[in-house]
């Protein structure tokens, strides 16, 4: 729940990305996303209530980074398309926020994600919910509680290739800004489809944990299939060093 004083204490750390010769990626789907969500943001000040108010943090962060780095490097931002819960941040609202970011000229591309780590974490990941693996990361009695009640907050969603594509198409139709598609992209055929539909880039994560050389293999043979089985057992490893536990 978002309460308190002004949240726009954004520093100048983006300059380090310029010095390193890298692009700056803003994770607007994390803290800023909590401000965007009416389910989480109960503020009564200028940062709560209307969508325009709730979007001030996301827009302010993007603007501060742009002011810091100018046009010396590209700025990409992850934007939550929807929370995946009743009364949460919805697609129509997210499209409007994306339009504002586009009109502000503060980002060079948007990476479209989904779900809220505070409300419905598995809405982004799809596939199995690794409740036992999560429980193992905690001491008792938390471990027992997660094993008994984990299904109530770590829901399982069926996995399918490019599972965020249908929602992302609405953003592609509404925006001129370059877009990055993510969510279950493991095949060259899917990458080609994304490009054909107007997405400038695709993003991959879990499949590369299982096979760091997957891109090279797909480049050499377009019929290459990923060995990732979407078990999501990599998720709990964030506490100890993110990796695929199936790789030995």
Image: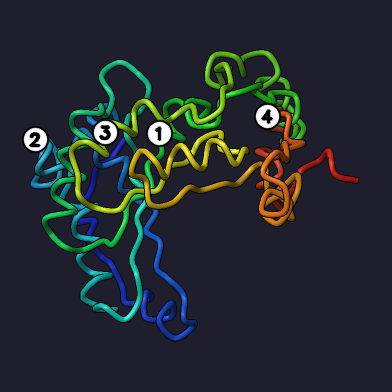
Left or right: where 190 falls relative to 34: right
First of labels 1, 4 by sequence position: 1
User: Which one is in front in this view, the residue at disc 4 or the one at disc 2?
Assistant: 4
Which residue is under mark 1?
A: 114
Which residue is under mark 3?
A: 37
First of labels 2, 1 by sequence position: 2
Which residue is under mark 4?
A: 230
- Picture quarter containing residue 87? top left
Across and down, in percent, residue 58 comes to 24, 52
First of labels 4, 3 by sequence position: 3
Across and down, in percent, residue 39 comes to 27, 26
Left or right: where 200 falls relative to 4: right
**As drawn, 124 above or below 158:** below
Give the Cα distance between marks 4 and 3. 28 Å
Give the Cα distance between marks 2 and 3. 11 Å
Across and down, in percent, residue 22 comes to 46, 75
- Picture quarter containing residue 67? bottom left
User: Which one is in front in this view, the residue at disc 2 or the one at disc 1?
Assistant: 1
**As drawn, 52 above or below 162:** below
First of labels 4, 2 by sequence position: 2
> Does dot 2 land on a helix, a strand or a loop?
loop
Left or right: where 22 falls relative to 89: right
**As drawn, 178 above or below 120:** below
Circles 1, 4 touching at the beta carbon (< 8 Å): no
Query: Residue 50 shows which numbered tag?
Result: 2
Specify whether residue 137 is in view.
Answer: no
């Amino acid at each position: 729940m978002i309460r308190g004083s002004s949240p726009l204490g954004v520093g100048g750390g983006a300059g380090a990305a310029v010095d390193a010769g890298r692009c700056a990626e803003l994770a607007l789907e994390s803290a800023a996303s909590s401000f965007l969500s009416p389910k989480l943001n109960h503020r009564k000040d200028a940062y709560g209530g209307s969508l325009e108010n709730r979007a001030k943090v996301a827009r302010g962060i993007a603007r501060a980074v742009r002011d810091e780095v100018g046009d010396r490097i590209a700025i990409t931002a992850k934007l939550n398309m929807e929370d995946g819960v009743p009364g949460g941040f919805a697609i129509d609202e997210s499209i409007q926020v994306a339009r504002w970011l586009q009109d502000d000229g503060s980002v060079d591309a948007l990476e479209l994600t989904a779900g809220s780590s505070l409300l419905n974490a598995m809405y982004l990941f799809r596939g199995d919910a690794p409740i036992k693996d999560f429980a193992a990361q905690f001491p008792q009695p938390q471990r027992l509680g997660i094993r008994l009640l984990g299904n109530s907050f770590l829901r399982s969603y069926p996995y399918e290739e490019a599972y965020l594509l249908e929602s992302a198409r609405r953003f592609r139709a509404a925006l001129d800004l370059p877009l990055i598609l993510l969510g279950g992209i493991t095949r060259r055929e899917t990458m080609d489809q994304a490009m054909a539909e107007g997405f400038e880039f695709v993003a991959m994560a879990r499949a590369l944990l299982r096979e760091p050389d997957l891109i090279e293999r797909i480049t050499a043979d377009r019929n290459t299939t990923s060995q990732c089985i979407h078990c999501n057992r990599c998720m709990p490893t964030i506490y100890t060093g993110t990796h695929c536990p199936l790789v030995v």
